[in-house]
Image: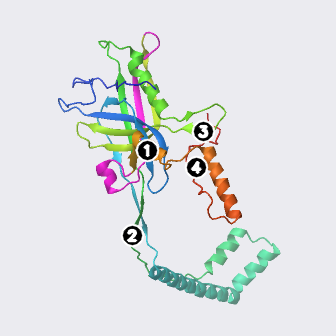
Amino acid sequence: MPENKEVQIQRPSRLNPWAKNSQIKSKNGSVWVSMKPKRILDQFSKGVGDIATEELPEEFIFLAPLSLNENIVHHWEAYESVASRIAQKVRSAVKLGAEGAALYQTGKSMINSDKIKTLFEARSADVGVSVENFVKQAYGSVHGSRIPKIKVDTPLYYTNSDRRQLVLEFQLFHEGKLKSNPEDVLIEPIQRMMKYSSPHLKNKGGISIDFPYMWEVKTIPYQFINYTTCALIGVQPTWNAPYLKGGVPASVNLQLTFQDMSPLYRDTITKGSVIRVIDAAEAASRNAQGIQPTSFSQDIAKAVDYAKSQLAGDQKGAVARIPTTPQRTDGIR
């Protein structure tokens, strides 16, 4: 990935559309969306999960679209207490009793009804009685039951919250007065975002990868949208004609879909995430102290040694550690 480079691609407008640096001061009420990728060095599974990252000197700054939508979803369900279950059993018993009484009366009337007996005998002998007529006559003999007037109320309780998702849509153009080439503004930055959103295969034919990059997304100058630990799960550019000299599209409709990696809590809204992000320096310190996971093969070896020690009754065997080096076995390339 290119180093020491800041990408500034914005939708043209009369309101100062082109950002000169990441420290944008809003003029004429303009709002910007800043998206910064971070390299994931390691990810830990305990609790909400810690992530070791490395800052990149790169930032994508787009002029905000006319509308920005957020959707917070929580799940609540009816609580099945012992009392509610007993009440539901009682209701089922009452219903069963009413249906049983109706069935008894139906059977009694059918047995005592010469008309039904004659109809059944005729149908059994197949002497011209249609199925429709037989069913109609039999249905007319069925007794109904009273529906029990019972309603079981249960409290509504909280169960879970969906992780936040943010969908951003930008319209990107290239103005002729710019000194940069159209492909440097419309194609190359989008392709870099595609690369940042994808994993890196370390060696051909292997299964070891580098994680896709984590993203920090926020609005500036005021951070009414603030996501500090995002995954870029969708990059959808629509290349629009007319095509310029060299076959470059004149404009691009770009849709970006971000999924928050952080579980949704109150602090997620105010702080952007509840995941503890470890910088590269701290990650190196953890690795030096033996805290950070080692390679996959070493983890497997430790697990095997631990299993052997347990079988041998040796309680001093090495502690097996869950391998967290990312592995891919799905054959995706």
Q: CA distance from mark 1 to mark 2?
A: 47 Å
Pick out the residue farthest to the left. Answer: 28
Instruction: Residue 21: say if magenta.
Output: no
Q: Residues within 10 Å of mark 3 (few under 14, many from 20)?
A: some
Q: Earlier in the sequence, mark 3 or mark 4?
A: 3
Q: What residue sits right under mark 2 in the picture?
A: 156
Distance of label 2 from label 4 (alpha carbons): 40 Å
Figure quadrant of the C terminus: top right
Residue that protrudes farthest toward the right in the picture: 125
Q: Earlier in the sequence, mark 1 or mark 3?
A: 3
Task: Give me the disc on residue 208.
Answer: 3
User: Label 2 crowding class (10 Å Cα cut-off): few <14, some 14-19, many 20+?
Assistant: few
Residue nearest the observer in this picture, 117 or 245: 245
Q: Position of residue 177 (x, y in %)?
A: 29, 12
**Residue at the location (78% across, 70% down)?**
128
Q: Amino acid at mark 1?
A: Ser
Q: CA distance from mark 2 to mark 3?
A: 45 Å
Q: Amino acid at mark 4?
A: Pro
Q: What label sits on residue 323 in the rendered view?
A: 4
Asked if residue 65 shows in the view, the reply is no
Marks 2 and 4 close (CB-CB < 8 Å): no
Mark 1, residue position: 285
Label 1, label 4: how far apart the Cα atoms are: 19 Å
Per the rendering, the mark at residue 87 is none
Q: Alpha carbon of mark 1 to alpha carbon of mark 3: how far?
A: 23 Å
- CB of mark 1 within 8 Å of CB of mark 3? no
Q: Which residues are magenta?
A: 245-274
In the image, residue 13 above or below residue 231: above
